[in-house]
Image (tube, rainbow, N blue to C red):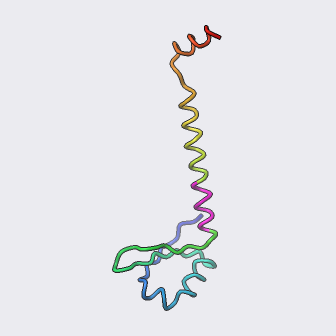
């Protein structure tokens, strides 16, 4: 997913041109941050970008789980030898 310019718009303006904003998010891939009282309040992105972000998050969670699993499999050699002797 390409990271484009993030447009900032205040809540009053977005009310007036909401249809235009969501069309630009969907069809042009633009991203918007809506501000309220000068503070970032919500983000508007197209559903394709949203789904891509969710997929990236899932992929990162899978990588983290793989790393955790690899670390869990490592045991000190003495412990391994003791467990092997018992078996």
Give coordinates of residue 42: x percent, y percent.
Answer: 46, 73
Residue in view at x 60 percent, y 78 percent: 28
What range is drawn magenta here? 49-57
Image quarter hosting the N terminus: bottom right
On screen, residue 33 versus residue 37, left or right, reads right
Compared with 65, 11 (above or below) is below
Furthest residue toward top: 85
Image quarter for residue 72?
top right
52 part of magenta stretch: yes
Residue in view at x 57 percent, y 15 percent: 80
Furthest residue toward left: 37
Compared with 47, 80 (above or below) is above
Residue in view at x 61 percent, y 9 percent: 86
Please identify the dominant SS of the magenta region.
Answer: helix
Compared with 15, 58 (above or below) is above
64 part of magenta stretch: no
On screen, residue 12 versus residue 53, left or right, reads left
Give coordinates of residue 46: x percent, y percent.
Answer: 60, 73
Compared with 86, 54 (above or below) is below
Residue in view at x 59 percent, y 13 percent: 83
């Amino acid at each position: 997913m390409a990271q484009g310019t993030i447009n900032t718009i205040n809540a009053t303006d977005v009310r007036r041109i909401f249809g235009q904003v969501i069309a630009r998010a969907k069809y042009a891939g633009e991203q918007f941050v809506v501000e309220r009282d000068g503070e970032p309040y919500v983000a508007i992105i197209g559903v394709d970008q949203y789904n891509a972000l969710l997929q990236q998050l899932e992929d990162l969670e899978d990588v983290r789980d793989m790393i955790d699993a690899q670390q869990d499999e490592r045991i000190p050699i003495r412990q391994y030898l003791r467990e092997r002797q018992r078996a």
